[in-house]
Image: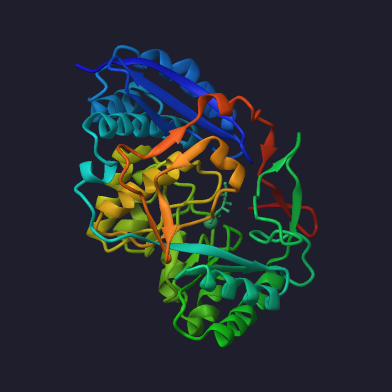
Amino acid sequence: MSRIESASVHVTAPGRNYVLLRVETSDGVVGWGDATLNGRELAVASYLRDHVAPLLAGLDATRIEDTWQYLYRGSYWRGGPVAMTAIAAVDMALWDVQGRTLGVPLYQLLGGASRNGCLAYGHATGESVEDLIASVRQHLADGYRAIRVQSAIPGMRDVYGVPRGGAAYEPAVRGARPTEATWDTGAYLRFIPAMFEQVRDAVGPDVPLLHDAHHRLSPREASQLGRSLEPYGLFWLEDVTPVEDQAAFRQIRSSTTVPLAVGEIFSSVWDCKTLIQERLIDFVRASVTHAGGISHMRKLLAFAELYGVRSGMHGATDISPVGIAANLHLGLAINNFGIQEHMPHPPVTSDVFTTAYTFDDGYLRPGEAPGLGVEVDLDAMDRFEYQTAYLPVNRLVDGTVHDW
Ligand code: GCO
Ligand code: MG
């Protein structure tokens, strides 16, 4: 029997902070799990190092579901992003071990491929609508078949999803305190329909376009935005309102036919049970890294399948290549795959991570390497030291704290 010999936590920062769990078995097989929780990284590192890793030594490495239940039910306290990200890392590492032991890519253990590749969307951005249209055209030239569009809003200084001066977008900023942004809902609601009209005119009706409202609207404002965007045929409108209040989506759903995506902050199926069961959303954005790993996400997405809700797993750069690979293996295997977010990691990330997954012709594919198919260079990790970084805090024009 293959036993877990050791489990160690690694914090590194090639480009940005990542937390990884490394599991090694008595047979000498190594598996990796992603435990990165943007802006709260060290809480998960401590949860794993202080409370989980010591429990893993000696367990049967093949008992993946049993270990999941042991960590979930066994802690008494349930759910939440810190615990569920920690459990996800263990789960991913054990699936990785299993794939490597059997010499097969993980998707083969999940039922095999259900499609040729995972349709991916890229992020087009612009400090003006003209720049945004140029960015959409560049994405099309790069092979993307679906594109998220975000642009600066006249009169607003910092806007979610829009980097300054053509830099790559990375919302977490290094420093001892979060940066602060200012938000004006009225200006946003007036501008976005006009932006979509111009983008649609420029690129024609066929390109699937997405947009992220990033939790800032009330249900009424969300309904208004959804209705105003109906003429532009969006693939999805994301995170219109903070999602703790699942019932709020009843109002939004009954007011607009715009396809809704929600849930990059979900930790488990319990965060979206009403949304799915009442068909209040079209895509669920939960990811393997933040929602309990492969074992739990498989259940969450099987539940979603019953109600015609498809996957749209979170794939921002704050999910490490290990977590992205896990999304891709699962996405390839399930029937109700929708789309996968693709925000390429900067080149320096490959100093630490070597991935079998590829992006080609608009599709992400997990590759054929055993397990998750990501190699992590332990020595290289030490060269990139953790630096405190936070997501921004958002305030209204009068200084009131608002959702970011
Ligand atoms: C997305 C997200 C990200 C998040 C970030 C937070 O749709 O990709 O909204 O940009 O803000 O991942 O950690
Ligand atoms: Mg988002």
Closer to the camera, 279 or 321?
321
Seen from the viewer's position, the closer of residues 301 and 276 is: 301
Q: Is residue 176 above or below residue 398?
A: above
- Front residue (pair 167, 186): 167
Q: Is residue 373 left or right of residue 239?
A: left
Residue for point 57% across, 41% down = 349
Rendered location of residue 118, percent (x, y): 36, 59
Tell me how many marks there are: 0
| In the foreground, 379 or 2 | 379
Q: Is residue 21 above or below residue 38?
A: above
Residue 172: horizontal and vertical position, in percent?
66, 45
- Which coloring applies here? rainbow
Question: Looking at the image, which residue is at 34% across and 28% down?
Answer: 72
Instruction: From the top left corner, tell me how far across and down residue 13 is, in percent.
Output: 62, 34
Which residue is painted at 57% across and 37% down in the image? 351
In percent of the image, x 51 and y 25: which residue is there?
A: 378
Residue 70, picture quadrant: top left
User: Which part of the image, by quadrant, shows the N terminus?
Assistant: top left
